[in-house]
Structures are given as structure tokens and as C-alpha cells.
Image (cartoon, rainbow, N blue to C red):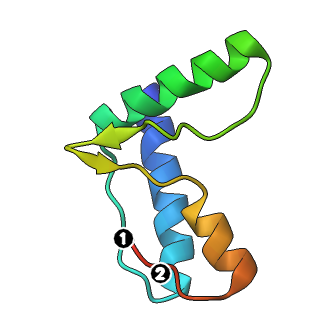
Amino acid sequence: MTDRVFIDDCVKSINDFRRSHQVSPLTHNSAVSVIAQRWADQLARTCSLGHNANATYSGQPLGENCAYKWYSDRRDVTGI
């Protein structure tokens, strides 16, 4: 399986889930993927787990675990 196939499969699965909740679909953003991978590599190097409070894209902060929060709380989440 290529990275592109894996990415496409992930985006499709996420969007299937989002559709079941009447939420608009997402698209893959390779620049955001680079940011996420760098943070994942940092966490792996330090054997830690945590949020990247400094992650931004186009001057906007990047959210983490938004879907988990929305799905687990069943409350409206702003900023999506």
C-alpha cells in the first residue's frame, strides 16, 4: 500500500464517520501532515505524549482531538 492509498483510505473513513453526523467532509492537507508528522516524531523520540500548543498553519492554531472531544461529550465544538 502506498502512502497515497493509505491517506485516501483514512480520509474516506473519517468522512464516512463525519457524514453519519451530518458534518461536512474534510480534505487532506500535505502541509498539515508534515507538521503532524514532525510532532509525532518528537513524541516518539522523547517517549512522551502531549499536545503541540505551538502548532499553527497559515497563522491559525491547529486543533487536536476535536473529533474525540465532540463525539465523547456530545456537545457543540466551536472552531471547526
Residue furthest to the left: 58
Disc 1 to disc 2, how far (Cα)?
Answer: 7 Å
Q: Label 1, on which residue?
A: 25
Please say if 34 is above or below 27.
Answer: above
For image coordinates 49% across by 21% down, the residue present is: 38
**What kind of residue is marked 1?**
Pro
Quadrant hosting residue 76: bottom right
The amino acid type of the residue labelled 2 equals Arg
Residue 15 x %, y %? 46, 68
In the rendered structure, are the residues bearing label 1 and label 2 in contact, judged by CB atoms less than 8 Å apart?
A: yes
Is residue 60 shown left or right of residue 36? left
Note whether residue 1 is visible.
no
Classify residue 44 as left or right of residue 70: right
| Residue on which disc 2 sits | 19
Callout 1: SS: loop
Q: Nearer the viewer, residue 13 or 71?
A: 71
Q: Residue at x 46, y 27 (%)?
A: 3
